[in-house]
Amino acid sequence: MELAIVPLGQIESTNLIGGKARALSQLIQAGFMVPPGYAVTTTVFGAMNSELKSAVLGSLDMLKVKKVAVRSSAVNEDGKDAAWAGQMDTFLNVGRRGVLTAVERCWSSANSPRAVSYARQRGLKVGPVAVIVQAMINGKTSGVAFSTHPVTQDDKQMIVEAVPGLAESLVSGNATPDSYVLDKVRGGVIEERINHRRPLLSAPQLKELKQVICAMEKYFGFPVDVEWTIHRGKLFILQSRPITTLG
Protein backbone atom coordinates (compact mmCIF):
# COMPACT_ATOMS: atom_id res chain seq x y z
CA MET A 1 0.00 0.00 0.00
CA GLU A 2 1.91 3.00 -1.29
CA LEU A 3 2.27 5.78 1.31
CA ALA A 4 -0.14 4.06 3.73
CA ILE A 5 2.72 3.36 6.14
CA VAL A 6 5.75 5.65 6.41
CA PRO A 7 8.70 5.15 8.79
CA LEU A 8 9.32 8.13 11.06
CA GLY A 9 12.19 10.18 9.69
CA GLN A 10 11.50 9.29 6.08
CA ILE A 11 9.02 12.00 5.11
CA GLU A 12 8.02 15.41 6.48
CA SER A 13 4.69 16.05 4.74
CA THR A 14 2.22 17.35 7.33
CA ASN A 15 -0.67 16.49 5.03
CA LEU A 16 0.42 12.83 5.06
CA ILE A 17 1.64 12.24 8.62
CA GLY A 18 0.26 15.13 10.68
CA GLY A 19 2.00 17.75 12.76
CA LYS A 20 3.17 15.52 15.60
CA ALA A 21 4.77 12.92 13.35
CA ARG A 22 6.31 15.64 11.18
CA ALA A 23 8.13 17.14 14.19
CA LEU A 24 9.40 13.71 15.24
CA SER A 25 10.57 12.96 11.69
CA GLN A 26 12.45 16.26 11.54
CA LEU A 27 14.13 15.50 14.88
CA ILE A 28 15.19 12.04 13.69
CA GLN A 29 16.69 13.52 10.53
CA ALA A 30 18.55 16.08 12.67
CA GLY A 31 20.06 13.35 14.84
CA PHE A 32 18.04 13.75 18.05
CA MET A 33 17.24 10.64 20.10
CA VAL A 34 13.65 9.68 19.18
CA PRO A 35 12.14 6.20 19.65
CA PRO A 36 11.75 4.41 16.30
CA GLY A 37 8.33 4.03 14.76
CA TYR A 38 6.09 4.66 11.79
CA ALA A 39 3.02 6.63 10.80
CA VAL A 40 -0.22 5.27 9.42
CA THR A 41 -0.82 8.14 7.00
CA THR A 42 -3.91 10.22 6.30
CA THR A 43 -4.31 8.49 2.92
CA VAL A 44 -5.96 5.55 4.71
CA PHE A 45 -7.77 7.53 7.43
CA GLY A 46 -10.74 5.50 8.66
CA ALA A 47 -10.20 2.62 6.23
CA MET A 48 -9.04 -0.38 8.25
CA ASN A 49 -9.34 -3.15 5.66
CA SER A 50 -7.48 -6.45 5.59
CA GLU A 51 -4.66 -5.06 3.46
CA LEU A 52 -4.03 -2.18 5.86
CA LYS A 53 -4.22 -4.50 8.87
CA SER A 54 -1.44 -6.62 7.39
CA ALA A 55 0.64 -3.54 6.62
CA VAL A 56 0.25 -2.09 10.14
CA LEU A 57 1.15 -5.38 11.82
CA GLY A 58 3.99 -6.07 9.40
CA SER A 59 5.56 -2.69 10.17
CA LEU A 60 5.04 -3.36 13.87
CA ASP A 61 6.90 -6.67 13.63
CA MET A 62 9.82 -4.88 11.97
CA LEU A 63 10.20 -2.69 15.06
CA LYS A 64 10.93 -5.84 17.08
CA VAL A 65 9.44 -4.49 20.30
CA LYS A 66 6.83 -5.98 22.63
CA LYS A 67 5.01 -2.76 23.44
CA VAL A 68 4.32 0.44 21.53
CA ALA A 69 2.81 3.87 22.05
CA VAL A 70 0.00 4.69 19.62
CA ARG A 71 -0.67 8.43 19.18
CA SER A 72 -2.94 10.58 17.04
CA SER A 73 -1.22 13.00 14.66
CA ALA A 74 -3.67 15.40 13.04
CA VAL A 75 -2.81 17.58 10.07
CA ASN A 76 -3.65 20.70 12.10
CA GLU A 77 -1.93 19.43 15.26
CA ASP A 78 1.13 20.90 16.99
CA GLY A 79 1.24 24.02 14.87
CA LYS A 80 2.23 27.52 15.96
CA ASP A 81 -1.38 28.55 16.57
CA ALA A 82 -2.95 25.41 18.04
CA ALA A 83 -1.27 22.63 20.01
CA TRP A 84 -4.21 20.21 20.32
CA ALA A 85 -2.46 18.83 23.43
CA GLY A 86 -4.66 16.18 25.03
CA GLN A 87 -7.52 16.66 22.56
CA MET A 88 -7.00 13.37 20.73
CA ASP A 89 -6.24 9.93 22.05
CA THR A 90 -2.93 8.32 22.98
CA PHE A 91 -2.50 4.71 24.06
CA LEU A 92 0.60 3.51 25.90
CA ASN A 93 2.10 0.04 26.42
CA VAL A 94 0.01 -1.46 23.62
CA GLY A 95 0.77 -5.05 22.66
CA ARG A 96 0.47 -6.54 19.18
CA ARG A 97 -3.11 -7.65 19.74
CA GLY A 98 -4.24 -4.17 20.63
CA VAL A 99 -2.51 -2.11 17.95
CA LEU A 100 -5.23 -2.19 15.29
CA THR A 101 -7.91 -1.22 17.81
CA ALA A 102 -5.70 1.59 19.11
CA VAL A 103 -5.24 2.95 15.58
CA GLU A 104 -9.00 2.93 15.01
CA ARG A 105 -9.63 4.64 18.35
CA CYS A 106 -7.13 7.36 17.42
CA TRP A 107 -9.10 7.90 14.22
CA SER A 108 -12.36 8.07 16.18
CA SER A 109 -10.94 10.61 18.61
CA ALA A 110 -10.70 13.12 15.75
CA ASN A 111 -14.49 13.42 15.96
CA SER A 112 -14.73 13.36 19.75
CA PRO A 113 -16.68 16.20 21.40
CA ARG A 114 -13.51 17.67 22.97
CA ALA A 115 -11.61 17.70 19.66
CA VAL A 116 -14.53 19.19 17.74
CA SER A 117 -15.06 21.83 20.45
CA TYR A 118 -11.35 22.71 20.48
CA ALA A 119 -11.34 23.12 16.71
CA ARG A 120 -14.50 25.22 16.71
CA GLN A 121 -13.12 27.59 19.37
CA ARG A 122 -10.08 28.27 17.17
CA GLY A 123 -11.89 28.45 13.86
CA LEU A 124 -10.20 25.25 12.63
CA LYS A 125 -11.23 21.96 11.12
CA VAL A 126 -10.02 18.74 12.71
CA GLY A 127 -9.23 17.28 9.31
CA PRO A 128 -7.76 13.84 8.63
CA VAL A 129 -5.67 12.13 11.30
CA ALA A 130 -2.52 10.08 10.88
CA VAL A 131 -1.47 7.69 13.65
CA ILE A 132 2.00 7.20 15.10
CA VAL A 133 3.04 3.71 16.21
CA GLN A 134 6.27 4.02 18.13
CA ALA A 135 8.48 1.84 20.31
CA MET A 136 7.36 2.21 23.93
CA ILE A 137 10.01 3.69 26.21
CA ASN A 138 9.19 3.12 29.87
CA GLY A 139 11.52 5.70 31.32
CA LYS A 140 12.43 5.85 34.99
CA THR A 141 11.93 9.63 34.93
CA SER A 142 9.90 11.64 32.44
CA GLY A 143 8.56 15.11 32.01
CA VAL A 144 8.09 18.21 29.94
CA ALA A 145 10.33 21.17 29.15
CA PHE A 146 9.64 24.65 27.80
CA SER A 147 12.55 26.30 26.04
CA THR A 148 11.17 29.74 26.94
CA HIS A 149 9.61 30.46 30.34
CA PRO A 150 5.89 30.08 29.49
CA VAL A 151 4.73 32.43 32.29
CA THR A 152 7.25 35.26 32.30
CA GLN A 153 8.09 34.72 28.60
CA ASP A 154 11.77 35.18 29.45
CA ASP A 155 13.63 33.61 26.52
CA LYS A 156 16.81 33.31 28.59
CA GLN A 157 15.14 30.89 30.99
CA MET A 158 13.85 27.36 30.52
CA ILE A 159 11.37 25.34 32.59
CA VAL A 160 11.86 21.60 33.21
CA GLU A 161 9.28 19.49 35.06
CA ALA A 162 9.88 15.86 36.02
CA VAL A 163 7.87 12.98 37.50
CA PRO A 164 8.71 9.35 38.26
CA GLY A 165 7.83 6.92 35.46
CA LEU A 166 5.85 8.12 32.46
CA ALA A 167 5.02 11.74 31.70
CA GLU A 168 1.35 10.89 31.10
CA SER A 169 0.53 11.55 34.76
CA LEU A 170 2.06 15.02 34.47
CA VAL A 171 0.45 15.86 31.14
CA SER A 172 -2.96 14.79 32.48
CA GLY A 173 -2.51 16.88 35.63
CA ASN A 174 -2.54 13.89 37.99
CA ALA A 175 1.00 14.29 39.36
CA THR A 176 2.95 17.05 41.07
CA PRO A 177 6.36 17.38 39.42
CA ASP A 178 9.78 18.46 40.52
CA SER A 179 10.19 21.82 38.80
CA TYR A 180 13.33 23.64 37.70
CA VAL A 181 14.01 27.06 36.20
CA LEU A 182 17.26 26.88 34.25
CA ASP A 183 19.49 29.69 33.00
CA LYS A 184 19.94 29.07 29.26
CA VAL A 185 22.79 31.54 28.91
CA ARG A 186 25.00 31.04 31.97
CA GLY A 187 23.88 27.53 32.85
CA GLY A 188 22.82 26.35 36.28
CA VAL A 189 19.57 26.25 38.21
CA ILE A 190 17.87 29.55 39.05
CA GLU A 191 15.05 28.01 41.06
CA GLU A 192 13.91 24.51 41.97
CA ARG A 193 10.92 22.94 43.70
CA ILE A 194 11.42 19.35 44.78
CA ASN A 195 8.22 17.45 45.52
CA HIS A 196 9.69 13.98 45.97
CA ARG A 197 11.91 12.44 48.62
CA ARG A 198 14.92 12.86 46.42
CA PRO A 199 15.44 15.06 43.35
CA LEU A 200 14.41 13.17 40.23
CA LEU A 201 17.07 14.79 38.06
CA SER A 202 20.81 15.01 38.71
CA ALA A 203 22.93 18.01 37.77
CA PRO A 204 24.35 16.20 34.69
CA GLN A 205 20.84 15.24 33.55
CA LEU A 206 19.62 18.82 33.89
CA LYS A 207 22.65 19.99 31.92
CA GLU A 208 21.91 17.48 29.15
CA LEU A 209 18.25 18.48 29.06
CA LYS A 210 19.21 22.15 28.75
CA GLN A 211 21.63 21.42 25.92
CA VAL A 212 19.20 19.21 24.00
CA ILE A 213 16.18 21.50 24.41
CA CYS A 214 18.25 24.56 23.41
CA ALA A 215 19.48 22.66 20.36
CA MET A 216 15.89 21.78 19.44
CA GLU A 217 14.81 25.40 19.81
CA LYS A 218 17.66 26.49 17.54
CA TYR A 219 16.88 23.76 15.01
CA PHE A 220 13.18 24.62 14.73
CA GLY A 221 13.69 28.37 15.03
CA PHE A 222 10.98 28.91 17.65
CA PRO A 223 10.36 28.14 21.37
CA VAL A 224 9.41 24.51 21.93
CA ASP A 225 7.26 22.53 24.35
CA VAL A 226 8.91 19.11 24.67
CA GLU A 227 7.93 15.78 26.21
CA TRP A 228 10.93 13.64 27.19
CA THR A 229 11.89 10.54 29.13
CA ILE A 230 15.10 9.05 30.53
CA HIS A 231 15.54 5.30 30.17
CA ARG A 232 18.69 3.49 31.25
CA GLY A 233 20.57 6.76 31.33
CA LYS A 234 19.52 7.82 27.82
CA LEU A 235 17.40 10.88 27.10
CA PHE A 236 14.62 10.31 24.55
CA ILE A 237 12.45 12.97 22.95
CA LEU A 238 8.83 11.82 22.69
CA GLN A 239 7.05 14.91 21.37
CA SER A 240 7.85 18.48 20.38
CA ARG A 241 5.52 21.33 19.53
CA PRO A 242 5.67 25.13 19.44
CA ILE A 243 4.73 26.97 22.65
CA THR A 244 1.42 28.47 21.57
CA THR A 245 0.83 30.61 24.70
CA LEU A 246 3.56 33.15 24.01
CA GLY A 247 2.49 36.60 22.85
Image (cartoon, rainbow, N blue to C red):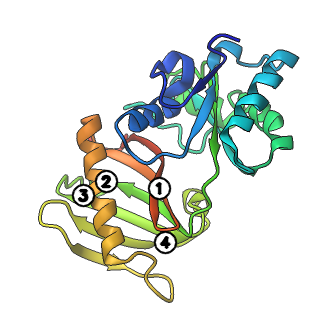
Mark 3 or 4, which is nearer the eye? 4
Residue beneath label 3, please? 152
- Residue 212 bears which disc, if any? 2
Residue corresponding to mark 1: 228
- Can residue 138 be seen here? yes
Q: Residue furthest left?
A: 186
Labels 1 and 2 touching (C-beta < 8 A): yes
Q: Position of residue 47 (x, y in %)?
A: 79, 16
Label 2 sits on a secondary structure element that is helix
Instruction: Examine the image and state in which quarter residue 44 appears.
Output: top right
Mark 1 element type: strand
Q: Which residue is mark 4?
A: 177
Residue type at the position of mark 4 = Pro
Q: In the rendering, at what x and y percent does residue 213 appear?
A: 31, 52
Q: Residues within 10 Å of mark 3 (few under 14, many from 20)?
A: few
**Which of the two labelled residues, at mark 4 and mark 1, occupies the earlier sequence position?**
4
Q: Is residue 154 left or right of residue 143?
A: left
Q: Which is more N-terminal, label 2 or label 1?
A: 2
